[in-house]
Image (tube, rainbow, N blue to C red):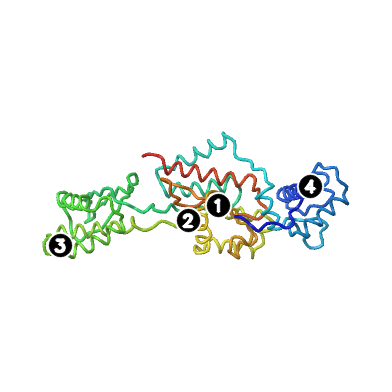
Amino acid sequence: MASEAISPAPNERAQSLLRVLIQRFIRDGQPVGSRTLSRDAGIDLSPATIRNVMSDLEQMGLISAPHTSAGRVPTPRGYRLFVDTLIRYKPPNEGEIRKMQSQLHKQQDDPEALVSSVSNLLSNITSLAGIVTVPRGQHATLRQIEFLSLSDNRVLAILVINDREVQNRIVHTDQPYTAAQLQRAANFINENYAGAGLLEIRERLLADLERTRDSMNQTMHDIIAVARSAMKGAATPPAEFVVAGETNLMDFAELSDIETLRRLFDAFSKKRFMLDLLDRSINAAGVQIFIGEESGVQILDDCSVVTAPYRADDDSVGVLGVIGPTRMAYDRVVPIVDITARLLGSLLHAPD
């Protein structure tokens, strides 16, 4: 996220002090005074000079004085300058990346479990709330269907979906069917509908059954109607996004009062708000950082959202990220979000 230029821009000395102030505030969550800043900055300046610099930064809208405190805290505008120009990012080391890869690789064959694993991974590593949208285009496509007759007028429908996922559906029927009858119905569906999406197949089957009612024998007609019912649950779209670690936000004093938490958890439940925000990132070139009001979601005015799109077959198919207070460790969080998006994309690229 770009922001309007700071005018006049702080000089190098002021930028150094601002960097130290923000780093200290992120670490401790307490307003930073001139004495603390003088000690931490490692710059040979008198407390009076530092107070003058802080006054200049305050006039620029980069820091503010909360209540009657003698210290200062960053403003969203200060955080923006920090993440755009002052920060020194700390990417995970090779050992941490291998551990992340290993955790996600275990869920590679199960798209829903993989998305859930990614959100949990982001939450656990950052101690924030992790959020991942379900990949676009991951609709259920039928590769093969088989039927197995069970007792008590039940039929087991075995659906192979998206090449690797197998779903079983038990359907109750009005009458028993022989193995030969079930095989003929499976052959008919596999020959005519394999490769199509389940939602599309259900609609096409309804139309085809009406059209061929006179030419198709009743038994065949009934079994295919059973197959259509079996696809209903499998064709249900998955959740649009997965959130993990919402309770981590209770550990931050600025977000821990009951009313703030209620509004935050309410935001997570309002899919439209979250999806609108995440959709703004899906075509981005890389990591996006929304600080405070930049998200456009009023409930998140006290939060920052760090997102990155993830890709499959050269297309952006989803977004992942974290939500936390504006006082988050951007130097650590931003590289983690970036690398996690790349790891997820590499798994979606991986051959069967």
Mark 4–mark 1 distance (CA, rounded to whole Å): 31 Å
Please report whichever mark, 3 or 2, sits nearer to the chain's N-terminal start: 3
Q: Is residue 78 left or right of residue 217?
A: right
Look at the numbered discs 3 and 2 and tell me whether their residues touch, using CB distance below 8 Å. no
The span from disc 3 to disc 1 (Cα, nearest Å) is 51 Å
* SS for dot 2: strand
Q: Is residue 145 above or below residue 255?
A: above
Q: Amino acid at mark 2?
A: Phe
Kindly check if marks 2 and 4 are in contact, taking CB atoms under 8 A apart as contact.
Answer: no
- Tag of residue 13: 4
Furthest residue to the front?
A: 8
Give the residue at mark 1.
307
Q: Which residue is mark 2?
A: 241
The crowd level at tag 4 (other Cα within 10 Å; few <14, some 14-19, many 20+) is few
Q: Secondary structure at mark 4?
A: helix
Mark 3 or mark 1: which comes first in sequence?
3
Q: CA distance from mark 3 to mark 2?
A: 40 Å
Question: Which residue position is annotated with label 3?
Answer: 212
Q: Give residue 50's position: percent from left, percent from top.
A: 84, 50
Task: Tell me how far mark 4 sits from mark 3, CA to CA.
Answer: 81 Å
In the image: residue 57, left or right of residue 190 = right
> What secondary structure is found at the residue carrying circle 3?
loop
